[in-house]
Image (cartoon, rainbow, N blue to C red):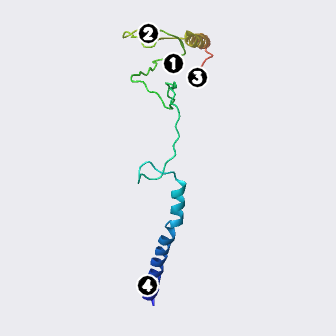
Amino acid sequence: MNKAVIGVAAILIVVAGAAGFWLGRPSDASKTAAAAAAPAASAPGSGPAVSVEAIKVERLALPQGITAVGSLRSDESITLRPEVAGRISAIQFREGERVAKGAPLVKLDPSVTQAELQQAQANMVLAKAKYDRAVDLQEQGLYLGPG
């Protein structure tokens, strides 16, 4: 039963393909209509005429720029790391300039370090006052020490 169904399906496919080929061919009437519509060619057998457009060539200036998106990376670079913390108040070299070994590169803002020095001096005066008081109390026998 299955062989019969496969055989009939194969025959139907062949018949459908032949019918499509035969129906898809241009008929003799359409061939004569196309030949009558095309003007006569200058040489026999040269084929149908092709329509073309022609314009005069003009010279124009084109922009000489290119727009691109990307990132730049320098060939040479250096990373500066400070030995001490602080704010930079002046840079003492120019970009691209050679710098001698040991030459100062930047000047730090002295206001932060001066404020820290003044705070340390004030703490020292306070600690000296506490020490002197403890010595006086010790001499009077009133001070027993910490804890």
Q: Which of marks 1 and 3 is nearer the N terminus?
A: 1
Q: Which of marks 2 and 4 is nearer the N terminus?
A: 4
Residue receiving disc 3: 146
Residue receiving disc 2: 104
Q: Is residue 117 above or below residue 38?
A: above
Residue at image position (54%, 60%) is 33
Q: What residue type is labelled 3?
A: Pro
Secondary structure at badge 3 equals: loop
Q: Earlier in the sequence, mark 3 or mark 4?
A: 4
Q: Which amino acid does label 1 sit on?
A: Ala
Q: Work out how far the residue at label 3 is from the one at label 2, CA to CA, in angstroms.
A: 48 Å
Residue receiving disc 1: 85
Q: Nearer the viewer, mark 2 or mark 4?
A: 4
Q: Work out how far the residue at label 1 is from the one at label 3, CA to CA, in angstroms.
A: 36 Å
Secondary structure at badge 1 equals: loop
Q: Which of marks 1 and 4 is in front?
A: 4
Secondary structure at badge 2 equals: loop
Q: Do the residues labelled 2 and 4 touch (CB within 8 Å)?
A: no
Quadrant assignment for the N terminus: bottom left
Residue at image position (42%, 87%) is 3
**Can you see residue 19?**
yes
Residue receiving disc 4: 7
Decide which of 142, 25 is in the foreground and name it.
Answer: 25
Q: Do the residues labelled 2 and 1 touch (CB within 8 Å)?
A: no
Quadrant assignment for the C terminus: top right
Q: Is residue 3 above or below residue 68?
A: below
Say which quarter of the image contains residue 145: top right
